[in-house]
Amino acid sequence: QVQLVESGGGLVKPGGSLRLSCAASGFTFSDYYIHWIRQAPGKGLEWVSYISKRGDTIAYADSVKGRFTISRDNAKNSLFLQMNSLRGEDTAVYYCAREIGYQPRLDFWGQGALVTVSS
Amino acid sequence: DIQLTQSPSSLSASVGDSVTITCRASQSIDSYLNWYQQKPGKAPKLLIYGASGLQRWVPSRFAGSGSGADFTLTINSLQPEDFATYYCQQSHTAPYSFGQGTKVEIK
């Protein structure tokens, strides 16, 4: 069955860096765009970034542009989010999700990884 | 960037009621509008895609409609498991923004 499993979350000081991973299984990873979405505690969903099947098309939310970098390794069925210059407002649960369809939608989501930015 | 505004932010309803949530986009997004359901501590689940397409295994009491900039999610005959927060999301143009959410609570 389709599975997405995030890892790499934790506590980091403001200005620090963290790298999230998302391990995919149960489908042909290289056939899909993959997204990162985050949710601050008690808040709504915020779209963060996506990457195309081969990694040649990438987009970011303005709030993370220049600080976060999305990448993927299709040989290892893995997605990554390198997060630099972290701020308190980056504290959130980070989800990876698979996109499908000619009307793009996110049909499978991971369980999420908590990132806490605090001194 | 495209902004999505959901209304209401929250509502109270009883089991068996029908409820409607609206989502308005800041510009036309054709039918590139999805709806998700989220329960506390869980990842969101896709309900409706392309404004009106029902995701597999989603009960037919959920229905989406609209195009352009105005969309609705209707839940007919609310069931206990439907009490959750609902989000719209546009996939017309990156950044793929979400609405702020609508919390459906038990009256």
Image (cartoon, rainbow, N blue to C red):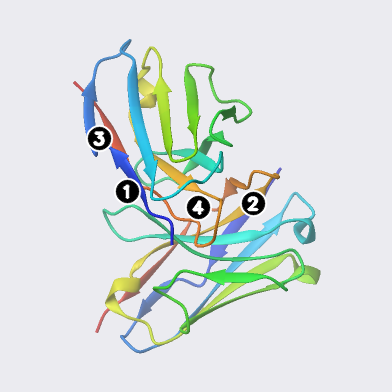
Q: Are marks 3 and 2 on the same chain?
A: no
**A25 and B57: which is toward the camera:** B57
In whole angstroms, how far apart are the C-alphas of marks 2 and 1? 21 Å
Which image quarter holds the C terminus of chain B?
top left
Label 4: few (<14), some (14–19) or many (≥20) C-alpha neighbours in 10 Å:
many
**Chain ID at mark 3:** B
Task: Give the label on residue B17, or none.
Answer: none
Q: Quadrant of residue B93?
A: bottom right
Label 3 with label 2: CB-CB less than 8 Å:
no
Disc 4 target residue = A111
**Label 1 element class:** loop
**B55 and B66: which is toward the camera:** B66
Among the two numbered marks 1 and 3 on one chain, the one whose residue lies closer to the N terminus: 3
Q: Height in image: A87 above or below A6?
A: below
Disc 2 target residue = A99
Residue shown at 48%/22% (left/top)? B62
**Label 2 element class:** strand
Q: Are marks 4 and 2 on the same chain?
A: yes
Disc 3 target residue = B8
Label 3: few (<14), some (14–19) or many (≥20) C-alpha neighbours in 10 Å:
some
Q: Height in image: A15 above or below B2?
A: below
The residue type indicated by label 2 comes to: Glu
